[in-house]
Structure formats: structure tokens, C-alpha cells
Amino acid sequence: MSFLPGIDLAEAKLSPIAPEPNWSALNAYQETITREDFLDLLNHVYAPSGSWKKFITLHDTDAIIRTGGTPFRLRFASSHATARAVPSYWRSRRMLPTVEPGRPLAGLKIALDPGHLGGQWAKMEERWFQIGKSKPVAEGDMTLAVAKLMVPQLEKLGAEVFLTRSKATPVTSLRPSGLKKTAAASLADRGVKPTAFRLQKERERLFYRVAEIRRRARLVNETIRPDLVVCLHFNAEDWRDPAKPSLVNANHLHFLVTGALSEDELSYEDQLHDMLVKLLSRSYAEEIAVTDQVARKMAAATGLPPFIYHGSNAVSVNDSSYIWARNLLANRLFACPVIYVEPYVMNNRSVFARIQAGDYKGLKKIGGVERKSIYREYADAIVDGLTAYYSNRPL
């Protein structure tokens, strides 16, 4: 008998390549959160506008979660005083060892996730463009360059640093050719006619946007187990015709945390499960605190205004206009706090000129302004933000 009247459990489905959720693993979070805190996080961060109500039924002492089988029962703590400790592999700032003189990041374990892929893979991802005979712009190569600049800086400050990838090549062993059946099922689920072209594009998308990210998430959650992940990205504005990329005036900066799941997204059992793991692991407060500090440093260093979402796929979650909650696979799957950075519009005229200038030490006049290389400005701002945040603990 269903605990959720009107819900057909047979409707439960999984996202492409997603493993079947292990609902019993959520028993570790029994009585770790009060009803009030659970509801507050649902309504303001993870599933605003009531998108959760079709899948979760709240009672005074527990929540009943829709699953593909027997509904899962989550028991609430009766108060903050009686709440059990939240299990997690990561440590918040207050849980880290005391600061060492001259090493403000000592004791901190950081994973850097250079977004996307580089080299020959960048074109497939459509995170690559070239104007005339200019140097090609490939986001995956650029994010890796930033990560490699950050590593020695962070290590000098005392952090233990890991990369989810150190080369342009993918981490996953899956390839588009092995995803034919999955691609056909994915298109059918979305009601899209499976033409040869669409099937090829879907195989590629599932490879670089799903399989690759899921492999990095396993690396983070099962092997590295860091206190923090920094997802490095660059942004871009639409240029309509992919064959004729154009430069634009828009340039901006924003940061993302997990949240704003829609009713349609929560209808996928794995996404509902992932959301609850993020909510119950209580990473949100730490994510917001460290991201806010990094956002301040990066906004000051770059002078970039905040990007503003106008649709329903993202919500502003704190006083900073730079930080938004959005449902992305990477920050949803990483079980620890995540800083997801989206600076610089790659096809902005000024940014494009800076990318063409490459990496260099010191300052160079570009567009009449003395600037650091765009890679060093990016890396330095993130490191400065992390230093400011983690320095604020007892000596």
C-alpha cells in the first residue's frame, strides 16, 4: 500500500546512466535533522515553489519519501539538542585543526575539478570556438590551466590538493559508441524522434556531460573524500550559429550551489535521492559561507557584475547577488561542499582578447588596461577567497 495517495510507484524512473538509489543508506541520517530545518531547506534551497510535495509527505515526526519500491521513512530529530551527529567524510571550517602560522590552509583537503574536456574532445562538447585564424578557445584546456596554477599556491598555504583530471582526456572509460541503447532510451523518455543525427548527439552528450561527471563524482566521494570541491568553469553567451561564432559585449560572474529542483527533475528517483543526500549531509551552510567569501574576492579582482537568472531553473539563495541554487549534476553528486565557479564570458570581446594573449607573468596592457593574465587573475582570486575564509579559525 502506498504511503503517498495518488502516486503510482510504477512511475518512478531513473536518469540516463544513473545507478538505482540505495535508499537504505539514508538510514545514517535518521534523527539528524528537525522537521523545521528539513522543511526550510526544501522550500528555500532544494525544491522551492513546492516542487517536492508530490514526492515527500511530511508528518510531525517523520517524512515519507516516494521510491520505486517501499517508501522510505525519514525520522526527524525532536529538537536541535537531541539531534544525532550528521555523518560525513568532509569537515567544515570549525572542524579543521587550528591554523598554523604562515599556513592558513593547513589541514584542508581540496579537490579541484577542471570543468569539461580539452584537446580533441573540446569540439565534441561544443565548448570550443575559433574566429578566423585566431587561437582556438577551448574551455576544458582553460580550466585545467587555472587548476594547475592553483595547485602550488594552495600547497604552499598548507592545503592537500587533488585534481579530478590532470590531462585533456576523459576520466571515464565509457565512450559514445558504447551508449547507443542508453541514448535511444533517453530520447524516447523526452519524446524526441530518434534520427541518426539526434542519436549521435545524444550519445556524445551522455558521454561528456553524464558519464564523465559521474566518474569524477565517484573519484571525489570514494577516493579523494575532500573537505571541499572547487568546480572551475568559464561562461559563454549564445552566438546562434555555431559555425559563425560572434563576439558580444556581455560579461559577468556567478557561483552555483545545488538546489532549485523542479517537479519534473524530482520525478527521477535518482535525482530525488541525490537531493536528499545533499540536504541531509548539511553541506549548504558551509557551501554558502565559503562561496560568499570567494565571490567577494573574485568580484573585486575581476570587476565583473553578477549574472542574473530570469527563469525558474535557478533561485537566489542568500544576500549575495552572485550566488544561485541550480540543479547541475556535478555539484549535486559531490557529497561535500562545492564552489561552482562561472566567470568570464569567453566570447566577450575583452575576454577573447585576454584568452588570445595566453598566460604570462606580471601585467600586460590589453585593450588599454594593464591586466594579469586571465588565468592568473582567476586562480589568484579563488586562492585569496579560500585563504580569507579558512584563515578565520583559532590559532
Image (cartoon, rainbow, N blue to C red):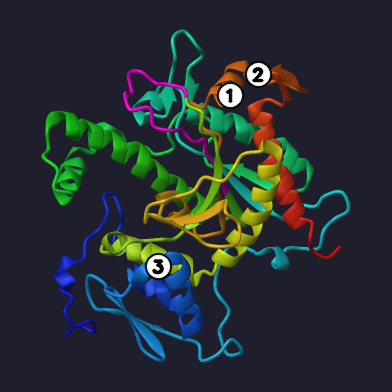
Q: Position of residue 367 (x, y in %)?
A: 65, 18
Q: Is residue 322 left or right of residue 131?
A: right
Q: Are marks 1 and 3 in contact (CB under 8 Å)?
A: no
Residue at 20 percent of width and 41 percent of height:
183
Would you name the residue on which mark 3 appears?
Answer: 48
The residues colored magenta run: 230-247
- Is residue 80 positioned above or below 283 on the image? below
10 Å crowding of disc 3: few (<14), some (14-19), many (20+): many
Dot 2 or dot 1, earlier in sequence:
1
Q: Is residue 52 left or right of residue 316?
A: left
Q: Position of residue 220 (x, y in %)?
A: 51, 51
Whole-number angstrom distance, CA of label 1 to CA of label 3: 37 Å
Name the amino acid type tagged 2.
Answer: Gly
Q: Are marks 2 and 1 in contact (CB under 8 Å)?
A: yes
Q: Are marks 2 and 3 in contact (CB under 8 Å)?
A: no
Residue 4 in sight: yes
- Is residue 77 positioned above or below 154 on the image? below
Whole-number angstrom distance, CA of label 2 to CA of label 3: 43 Å
Name the amino acid type tagged 1.
Answer: Ser
Q: Position of residue 173 (x, y in %)?
A: 36, 37
10 Å crowding of disc 2: few (<14), some (14-19), many (20+): few
Question: Which of the 4 quarters of the picture holds residue 298?
Answer: top right
Dot 2 or dot 3, earlier in sequence:
3
